[in-house]
Image (tube, grey):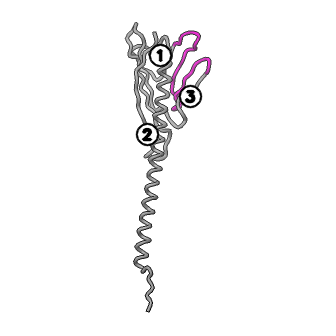
């Protein structure tokens, strides 16, 4: 009498259930990793936009001979800079959620990407009358129209910069 060894129905169902749980876990893990990677990319985009914008603005302020807007003790969302000759004067302003740098030689240049929106920018001239201009810059950037709430991200950065002389 020979006995054949085979899996019973219960053993087969258990193996399939265990393999299904392992496959499901792997799928959930890969989805969560993909979501985390996308969230990191959104955060990096906003942080890079803030860093680049503040770098350009700070550089222009350091090169400027005077600040025309805002006046000492005042605040404004527009920055006007008198540049030393022959460099054209500079205006920095937000327009439709995009931060723009404008001079008469080059025209308007976009400082932030289309993926990032300027939620708020404030230039505050913290110098006293007769002193070298010192500007406090507060910039808030956010992801541009994210459809998913987990990808909503905004960053507020602030710095203070003085004109050259």
Under circle 3, the secondary element is strand
C-alpha separation, residue under disc 1 versus residue under disc 2: 30 Å
The answer to which of marks 1 and 3 sits earlier in the sequence is 1
Q: Where is 107 relative to 119, above or below? A: above
Q: Which of 150 and 122 is in front in this view?
A: 150
Q: Which of 37 and 3 is in front in this view?
A: 3
C-alpha separation, residue under disc 2 versus residue under disc 3: 21 Å
Q: Where is 20 relative to 82, above or below? A: below
The answer to which of marks 1 and 2 sits earlier in the sequence is 1
Image coords of residue 111 (percent x, y): 53, 28
Q: Nearer the viewer, residue 62 or 77?
A: 62
Image coords of residue 98 (percent x, y): 53, 31
Q: Name the residue under label 2.
A: 153
Q: Which mark is residue 54?
A: none
Farthest front residue in view: 1
Q: Are marks 2 and 3 in contact (CB under 8 Å)?
A: no
Residue visible at 41% across and 13% down in the picture: 72
* Residue depth check, mark 1 versus mark 2: number of the one nearer the observer: 1
Image coords of residue 39 (percent x, y): 45, 44
The span shown in magenta is 82-106
Q: Where is 148 relative to 143, above or below? A: below
The quadrant of the image that shows the C terminus is top left
Q: Mark 1 points at which residue?
A: 62
Q: Where is 23 relative to 52, above or below? A: below
Decide if residue 104 is on the left or right side of residue 120: right
Q: In which quarter of the image is residue 40?
A: top left
Q: Is residue 103 magenta?
A: yes
Mark 1 is surrounded, within 10 Å at the Cα level, by few (under 14), some (14 to 19) or many (20 or more) other residues, namely some
Q: Name the residue under label 3.
A: 110
Residue visible at 45% across and 34% down in the picture: 47
The answer to which of marks 2 and 3 sits earlier in the sequence is 3
The quadrant of the image that shows the N terminus is bottom left
């Amino acid at each position: 009498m020979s006995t054949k060894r085979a899996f019973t129905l219960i053993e087969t169902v258990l193996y399939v259930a265990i393999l299904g749980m392992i496959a499901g876990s792997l799928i959930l893990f890969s989805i969560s990793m993909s979501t985390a990677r996308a969230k990191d990319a959104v955060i990096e985009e906003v942080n890079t936009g803030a860093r680049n914008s503040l770098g350009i603005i700070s550089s222009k302020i350091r090169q400027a001979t005077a600040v025309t807007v805002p006046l000492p003790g005042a605040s404004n969302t527009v920055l006007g800079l008198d540049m030393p000759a022959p460099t054209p004067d500079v205006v920095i302003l937000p327009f439709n959620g995009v931060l723009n740098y404008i001079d008469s030689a080059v025209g308007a240049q976009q400082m932030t990407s289309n993926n990032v929106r300027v939620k708020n920018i404030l230039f505050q001239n913290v110098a006293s009358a007769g002193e070298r201009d010192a500007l406090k810059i507060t910039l808030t950037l956010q992801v541009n129209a994210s459809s998913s709430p987990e990808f909503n991200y905004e960053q507020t950065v602030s710095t203070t910069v003085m004109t050259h002389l």
